[in-house]
């Protein structure tokens, strides 16, 4: 179940604690043992950079579950959560969409002076427990993008590789092979789309426009909707009454709860549009996300939206 060497690493969370906080986490019930046995994360305890560092590996859901329990034990309300990050990731944390998202959450993030950077640096999340957890999630998403493009590797997240256990995660094996999972997801979505389009064709007595959707997400518009420009891809629109463009492709409309829309605006939407090569528009009043592009690209965009929306705090 180890990840193939050719695959990018799942970026871990490296959290800094005091020795007193680590002792509190290991009191019965021991949250570090529970995180490994019940949640399935891979946990490494190191002392470096003046702090006790817990390196937590796993899926995003596993990391969030493990860290949520730790924060609930350590902080009654507000607190600080130091994250140890490789300096190569520092420019990624300057992205405006990251700071706009943190501002929407009411979260705070302290970064060091760029002139003081070494091989690694501390980024400190501040706020209540949910705000600290969401900040760590967004930072991890930015770092995962760098790892997916080969700019980060295992050595960026461990002080001593000889002391680090192998990258073996207690999770379903298909999650350890994202390329295979992506191909399976594409086939599944294409089959569902085809069935829904055939049903629409039988119901309306006319050919249905091609376009994928997850189950229960397809809404066929009455008129063609203009394709969103890249500049407007993450901007909300006050109404859906724009004049139709003749011959323009009909976008897929994905309905999302308002809370998830607020969570995904704007950086998650921008990342999905960029990485999946789709045109994305948001109608806040209608709670709809409009996706335009190729069949496979839209299918992957829908999958990405579902995965990112699952990170929305309850």
Image (cartoon, helix red, strand yellow):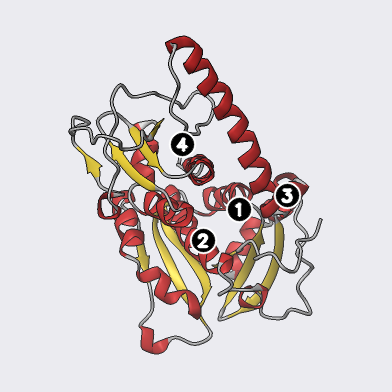
* Front residue of this view, candidates 119 and 73: 119
Q: CA distance from mark 2 to mark 1?
A: 10 Å
Q: Are marks 1 and 3 in contact (CB under 8 Å)?
A: no
Residue marked by disc 3: 40
Residue 314's label in the rendered image is: 4
Residue 140's label in the rendered image is: 2
Q: Quadrant of residue 57?
A: bottom right
Question: Few, some or many C-alpha atoms within 10 Å of disc 2 (few <14, some 14-19, many ≥20)?
Answer: many
Question: Few, some or many C-alpha atoms within 10 Å of disc 4 (few <14, some 14-19, many ≥20)?
Answer: few
Q: Earlier in the sequence, mark 4 or mark 2?
A: 2
* Image quadrant containing the N terminus: bottom right
Mark 4 falls on what kind of element?
loop
Q: Are marks 2 and 1 in contact (CB under 8 Å)?
A: yes
* Front residue of this view, candidates 303 and 75: 303
Residue marked by disc 1: 63
- Which residue lies at the image location 29% right of the left edge and 45% below the top edge? 228
Mark 1 falls on what kind of element?
helix
């Amino acid at each position: 179940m180890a990840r193939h060497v050719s695959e990018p690493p799942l970026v871990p969370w490296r959290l800094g604690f005091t020795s007193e906080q680590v002792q509190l986490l290991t009191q019965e019930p021991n949250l570090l043992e529970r995180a490994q046995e019940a949640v399935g994360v891979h946990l490494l305890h190191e002392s470096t950079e003046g702090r006790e560092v817990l390196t937590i590996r796993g899926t995003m859901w596993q990391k969030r579950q493990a860290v949520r329990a730790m924060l609930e034990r350590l902080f009654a309300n507000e607190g600080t959560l130091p994250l140890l990050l490789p300096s190569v990731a520092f420019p990624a944390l300057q992205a405006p969409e990251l700071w706009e998202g943190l501002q929407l959450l009411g979260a705070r993030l302290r970064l060091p002076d760029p002139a003081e950077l070494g091989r690694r640096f501390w980024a400190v999340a501040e706020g209540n427990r949910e705000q600290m957890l969401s900040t760590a999630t967004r930072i991890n998403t930015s770092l995962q993008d760098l790892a997916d493009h080969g700019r980060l590797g295992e050595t960026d997240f461990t002080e001593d590789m000889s002391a680090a256990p192998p990258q073996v995660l207690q999770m379903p094996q298909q999650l350890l092979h994202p390329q295979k999972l992506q191909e399976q997801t594409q086939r599944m979505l294409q089959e569902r789309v085809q069935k829904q389009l055939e049903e629409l064709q039988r119901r309306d007595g006319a050919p249905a426009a091609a376009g994928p959707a997850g189950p229960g997400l397809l809404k066929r518009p009455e008129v063609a909707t203009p394709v969103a420009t890249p500049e407007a891809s993450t901007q909300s629109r006050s109404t859906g009454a724009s004049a139709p463009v003749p011959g323009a492709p009909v976008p897929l409309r994905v309905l999302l709860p308002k809370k998830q829309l607020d969570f995904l605006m704007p950086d998650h939407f921008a990342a999905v549009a960029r990485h999946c090569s789709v045109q994305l528009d948001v109608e806040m009043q209608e709670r709809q996300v409009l996706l335009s592009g190729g069949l496979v690209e839209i299918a992957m965009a829908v999958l990405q939206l579902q995965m990112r929306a699952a990170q929305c705090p309850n």
